[in-house]
Image (cartoon, rainbow, N blue to C red):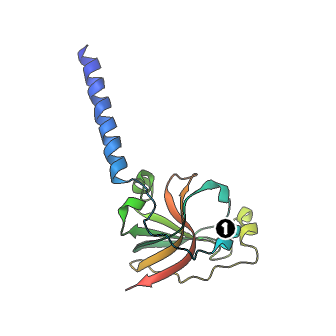
């Protein structure tokens, strides 16, 4: 085996080991908490629901709010640093800055015309947290196929913790 082939093989082994370690660190597994009182009607107001793969239909995740942002599709996005890091997958770690994406559907009127139908006649009534708040969110734990990260979407309830 040539020196170049050995170097390539060594690099391949290192890359596989790094990918395996990253997968162990960010497994993206569903929270261990199963809840029974999620509002199934919220799915009628999810813009393009086919993009979401449901991992756990109703669960709870607690953590600290990093940021809150209103999106053009009418959803309120909360970036949450979860207490249980195992809910994050590698895409959450890299592209969502080690946060779990939390989406409250139709929290405000959408400015994106394609999302208007999803929110027609409905506005979510949730307590909007502030950055730094400790909260518990209850909703569906899903993988967003468009982005690749895990989310709680749609959110049934946001509870402030003390």
Residue 106: horizontal and vertical position, in percent? Answer: 65, 73
Q: Quadrant of the C terminus?
A: bottom left
When asked about the image quadrant of residue 144, the answer is bottom right
Mark 1 — residue? Answer: 43
Q: Residue furthest top?
A: 1
Residue at (68, 73) in percent of width and height: 41
Residue at (53, 84) in percent of width and height: 127
Indicate left or right for 76 with 89 as reference.
Answer: right
Decide if residue 111 is in sight here.
no
| SS of the residue under disc 1 | helix
Q: Quadrant of the N terminus?
A: top left
Is 114 situated above or below 107? above
Residue at (33, 53) in percent of width and height: 25
The residue closer to the viewer here, 11 or 140, is: 140
Residue 147: horizontal and vertical position, in percent? Answer: 54, 53
Residue 154: horizontal and vertical position, in percent? Answer: 59, 69
């Amino acid at each position: 085996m040539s020196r170049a082939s050995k170097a390539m093989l060594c690099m391949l082994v290192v890359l596989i080991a790094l990918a395996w370690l990253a997968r162990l660190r960010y497994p993206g597994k569903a929270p261990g908490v199963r809840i029974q009182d999620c509002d199934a009607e919220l799915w009628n107001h999810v813009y393009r629901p086919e993009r979401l793969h449901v991992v756990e239909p109703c669960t709870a995740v607690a953590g600290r709010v990093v940021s809150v942002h209103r999106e053009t599709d009418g959803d309120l996005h909360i970036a949450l640093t979860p207490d249980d890091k195992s809910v994050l997958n590698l895409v959450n770690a890299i592209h969502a800055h080690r946060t779990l994406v939390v989406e409250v559907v139709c929290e405000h009127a959408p400015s994106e015309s394609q999302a208007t139908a999803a929110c027609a006649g409905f506005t979510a009534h949730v307590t909007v947290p502030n950055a730094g708040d400790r909260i518990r969110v209850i909703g569906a734990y899903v993988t967003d196929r468009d982005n690749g990260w895990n989310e709680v979407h749609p959110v049934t309830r946001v509870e402030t913790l003390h």
